[in-house]
Amino acid sequence: MEITQKIENWASLHYPAWFDFVRMGLGVFLFAKGFIVLSQIDAVQTFITNINLLNGSHINWSAQLLVQFIAYIHIIGGLFMAVGFITRLAIFFQIPILLGAVFFTMPGIRMSAENNLAQGGVNFVWSEINLTHNPVEWWTALITLILLISMFIIGSGPWSVDKYLEHYEEE
């Protein structure tokens, strides 16, 4: 038996019913967050452009394309998570975005263009604690990432389109 089948069997036996509501709520949250990212596209583009400038590379990231990709992944993935349709695939595309959000919004980190490790890289340096920095965005990203990883392992649950389609195909 493959490891994924073992995880699937364990998850189906030990799945808490309330976790479906968490999955639905997180899906709605990511769906809404996608629209928030689209509404604040200028600020996110500036952030991505600053990372590129600090990097010192001449790679021309298309900030607009990247921001739209992130927003639409949140919108589509959040909708799929909320209804429980191909949940693990939707989560698979969300996890790298949330890893980046946790990494780039971490309190006490500042970006420096001076990098002694690699040519053209971004050096992340611990700085003094900045009391004016509001870490709410970081905590939100971290909790969302933890929930996504948990849902990726456990699966979509009994109240989902995936489970309905599974039972529909058996009949």
Image: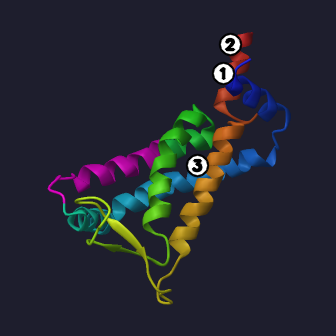
Query: SS at mark 1?
Result: helix
Q: Residue at x 68, y 47 (%)?
A: 150
- In the picture provided, is 34 more to the left or to the right than 143? left
Residue 47 vertical position relative to residue 13 in the rendered view, above or below: below
Q: Position of residue 86 (x, y in %)?
A: 57, 31
Q: Which residues are magenta?
A: 57-76
Q: Residue at x 26, y 49 (%)?
A: 65
Residue 137 vertical position relative to residue 7 in the rendered view, above or below: below
Q: Is residue 71 magenta?
A: yes
Label 3 to label 2, Cα distance in Å? 25 Å
Residue at the disc numbered 3: 27
If the image is split into quadrants, where does the N terminus sit? top right
Q: Residues at badges 1 and 2 in contact (C-beta under 8 Å)?
A: yes
Q: Amino acid at mark 1?
A: Leu
Residue 31 vertical position relative to residue 171 in the rendered view, above or below: below
Residue 152 falls in which quadrant of the image? top right
Query: SS at mark 3?
Result: helix
- In the picture provided, is 150 more to the left or to the right than 139? right
